[in-house]
């Protein structure tokens, strides 16, 4: 009887570990996504405005806009490392 | 190859009599990039002015404006007639003089007729709108006016209003507000207006017409339909004129644009009382063509000099790409960032190889690759224009690369062929995930990530090497050493990491015997490289030191090659799982009515899901790999900002000499 209970508990712990991992991975992508979004918001708006004024700076504008986006890639990498 | 075309600066000097034939000749060659003369009143340039347009420029411009306005009425652009048989330019000029006034008159008559018809339609619509409220009142229009002692007020209101004085009232309620007409004695006007003013009453004008309201409205309606038929007739006439003269007009446009550009060319030259000087650039290989052409056209009475570069003067030659054919479409991608400078390495060739490679690594799926390849080839038939065509060619190359990587990953719409029990080949590199019961392989995520970082290390090293070349050209040794320092920093850090930890796909140097402080030989070399690199970078500029962590962040940034790809695989597998395993398969065993509906839903989920994932893959694969070029690669060596090579003249597309 006691043994059976113990086995179930171990399985539950394992399952809950998996769940925690999944939660962590989700948080890593989600939070970095929000972070990148917030950071790109201002830059993107300014970049679009500047490009409308002068098309030649499109390359520079794109470059500046995507700089914070690396954060979310880091988040994605971290979550992949957590999951696998 | 990695270099723009070499340019030679030409100075063309001749007497003003030769100017027109010289301009025509230059225009024909389409090789001479004119440097505009700017009158800055510099010393030694007294008496040199910007030239005047040639005789006839004004008339030509007027004709061109007429043609453009007719084209506007017809709604045509010269591009519509690409591929039509070419017409001789001389005959076009004759026809312009003979026929253009006639066509212009016809077109302006027709447009005048059409706008007058449109104006009449508007008047009639206005009248109908005024009459409409009265159509519900059982009175003829004649009864509303012509009284001496009685006034009439009409208006819209949503409810019946009590009038406190003697009157005759007609009220018809309606959903959108009823109509009320009140007849009363002239003396009672103020009382009536007060009563109406307190209620929600909106006065409307009474039409000054006679007869039945219905008949009047019908009459105006029939007038409108007659006018509409008239407009359709005019449009048909314009359409006939367009099909008769469209191609001719497009050819006229081309001939006149060319003539106007030639006539106005002297505005870009320096001239004195007697001579003109044209300053500009020609690709070095074509110098002889231009020279001999000019001397033939002017009977050898013109001087063409190859200007030597004087040391103090900084000249900026225009930049024309010089790439093999397969790399040409990629020039558009480099142009979006910025055209290379004349003395800078042109990265187009590298991007032409690396961009499709990265796109393939990210998307890597036979199914999606085929869809995008079909899309690129299909759109190429529909969409015209140079830039669009170039971008579609880039997409074509990228999707071919995606198919190749699809074979390597053994992926078709996210699934391994083994999922259908077809054992064809094993993936060389697996990104499959364990989603669904058909899942086959578990991809080795760590290997994928390290593979991506390797690509980053190689590309960044290549970028720094190109930076070394660019700085070496200016004999700028401090910056050369700085760039070498960056390479040393990166590889030093790598050696140090390898000597401490074993990483898959990377050399394992942890086995070497430790020498000092627990570091082995490789670790010590790495440390030395780090220190040397830091010194070199610091000599370039101490501020650069805060950029050192960017080595790590840029290298890790390349992991997106694996990470973005994996997320697209995950989406594809989830779509397959939901559609096939959850919706379609269980219902296939026993067909019921509900089951068939669920199967249809499953097929819809499958199609929409994969459509969405194709779009995401295109966006992700394209933008992410483009960004790696622009941010991680270009920042190492590329400045850009070169002037585009715009040779004087244009390609004749609709006419010939």
Image (cartoon, coloured by chain):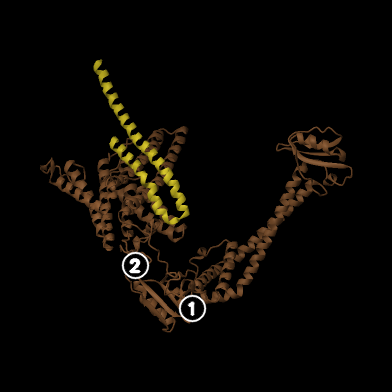
Q: Residue at x 70, y 38 (%)?
A: B176
Residue B444, can we see it?
Answer: no
Q: Which chain is brown?
A: B
Front residue of B45 and A3: B45
Q: Which percent across, then down, holds residue B655?
A: 50, 72
Q: Which percent across, then down, holds residue A30?
A: 37, 36
Residue where numbered disc 2 is placed: B5
Front residue of B149 and B109: B149
Q: Which percent across, then down, holds residue B409?
A: 29, 46
Q: Dots 1 and 2: beta carbons under 8 Å?
A: no
Q: Which chain is yellow?
A: A
Q: Quadrant of residue B186?
A: top right
Q: Quadrant of residue B179?
A: top right
Instruction: Name the chain letter of the residue that bears numbered label 2.
Output: B
Q: Residue at x 83, y 35 (%)?
A: B191
Front residue of B161 and B587: B161
- Above/below status of B528 relative to B47: above
**Label 1: how many Cα within 10 Å (few below 14, some 14–19, many 20+):** some
Give the left or right position of residue B62, taking residue B461 as reference.
right
- Most distant residue in the right direction: B148
Residue where numbered disc 1 is placed: B20
Tags 1 and 2 on a common chain:
yes
Instruction: Name the chain letter of the residue that bears numbered label 1.
Output: B
């Amino acid at each position: 009887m006691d043994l059976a209970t113990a086995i179930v508990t171990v399985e539950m712990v394992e399952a809950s570990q998996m769940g925690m991992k999944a939660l962590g991975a989700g948080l890593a992508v989600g939070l970095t996504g929000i972070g990148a979004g917030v950071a790109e918001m201002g830059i993107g708006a300014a970049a679009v405005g500047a490009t409308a004024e002068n098309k030649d700076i499109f390359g520079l504008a794109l470059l500046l806009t995507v700089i914070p986006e690396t954060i979310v890639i880091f988040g994605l990498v971290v979550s992949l490392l957590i999951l696998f | 190859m990695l270099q723009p075309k070499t340019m030679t600066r030409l100075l063309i000097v001749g007497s003003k009599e030769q100017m027109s034939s010289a301009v025509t000749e230059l225009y024909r060659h389409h090789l001479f990039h004119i440097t505009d003369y700017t009158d800055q009143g510099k010393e030694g340039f007294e008496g040199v002015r910007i030239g005047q347009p040639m005789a006839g420029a004004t008339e030509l411009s007027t004709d061109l404006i007429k043609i453009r306005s007719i084209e506007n009425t017809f709604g045509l652009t010269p591009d519509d007639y690409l591929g039509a048989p070419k017409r001789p330019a001389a005959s076009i000029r004759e026809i312009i003089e003979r026929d253009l006034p006639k066509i212009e008159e016809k077109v302006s008559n027709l447009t005048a007729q059409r706008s007058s018809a449109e104006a009449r339609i508007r008047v009639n619509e206005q009248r109908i709108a005024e009459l409409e409220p009265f159509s519900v009142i059982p009175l003829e229009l004649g009864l509303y006016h012509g009284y001496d002692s009685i006034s009439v007020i009409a208006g819209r209101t949503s409810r019946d209003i009590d009038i406190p004085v003697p009157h005759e009232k007609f009220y018809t309620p309606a959903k959108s507000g009823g109509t009320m007409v009140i007849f009363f004695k002239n003396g009672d006007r103020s009382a009536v207006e007060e009563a109406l003013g307190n209620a929600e009453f909106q006065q409307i004008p009474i039409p000054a017409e006679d007869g039945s309201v219905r008949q009047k409205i019908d009459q105006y309606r029939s007038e409108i339909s007659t006018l509409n038929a008239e407009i359709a007739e005019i449009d048909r006439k314009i359409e006939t004129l367009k099909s008769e003269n469209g191609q001719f007009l497009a050819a006229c446009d081309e001939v006149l644009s060319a003539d106007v550009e030639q006539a106005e060319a002297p505005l870009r030259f320096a001239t004195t009382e007697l001579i003109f000087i044209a300053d500009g650039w020609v690709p070095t290989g074509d110098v002889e063509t231009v020279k001999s052409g000019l001397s033939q056209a002017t009977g050898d009475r013109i001087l063409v000099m190859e200007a030597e570069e004087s040391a103090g003067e900084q000249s900026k030659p225009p930049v024309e790409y010089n790439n093999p054919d397969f790399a040409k479409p990629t020039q558009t991608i480099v142009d979006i960032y910025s055209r290379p400078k004349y003395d800078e390495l042109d990265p187009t060739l590298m991007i032409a190889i690396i961009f499709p490679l990265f796109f393939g690594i990210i998307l890597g799926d036979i199914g999606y690759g085929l869809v995008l390849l079909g899309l690129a080839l299909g759109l190429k038939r529909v969409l015209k224009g140079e830039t669009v065509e170039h971008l579609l060619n880039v997409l074509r190359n990228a999707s071919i690369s995606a198919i190749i990587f699809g074979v390597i990953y053994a992926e078709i719409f996210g699934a391994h062929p083994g999922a259908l029990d077809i054992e064809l080949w094993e993936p060389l590199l697996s990104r499959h995930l364990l989603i669904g019961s058909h899942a086959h392989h578990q991809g080795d995520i760590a290997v994928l990530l390290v593979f991506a970082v390797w690509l980053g290390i190689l590309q960044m090293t290549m970028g720094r090497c190109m930076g070394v070349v660019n700085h070496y050209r200016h004999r700028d040794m401090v910056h050369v050493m700085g760039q070498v320092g960056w390479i040393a920093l990166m590889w030093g850090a790598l050696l140090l990491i390898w000597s401490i930890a074993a990483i898959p796909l990377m050399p394992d140097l942890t086995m070497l015997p430790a020498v000092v402080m627990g570091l082995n030989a490789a670790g010590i070399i790495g440390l030395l490289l780090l220190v040397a690199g830091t010194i070199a970078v610091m000599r370039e500029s101490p501020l650069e030191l805060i950029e050192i962590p960017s080595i790590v962040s840029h290298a890790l940034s390349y992991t997106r090659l694996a990470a973005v790809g994996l997320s697209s695989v995950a989406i594809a597998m989830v779509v397959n799982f939901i559609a096939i395993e959850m919706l379609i398969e269980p219902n296939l065993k026993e067909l019921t009515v509900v089951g068939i509906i669920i199967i249809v839903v499953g097929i819809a989920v499958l199609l929409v899901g994969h459509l969405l994932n194709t779009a995401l893959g295109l966006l992700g694969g394209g933008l992410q790999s483009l960004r790696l070029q622009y941010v991680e690669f270009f920042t190492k060596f590329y400045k850009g900002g070169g002037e585009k090579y715009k040779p004087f003249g244009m390609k004749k597309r609709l006419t010939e000499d």
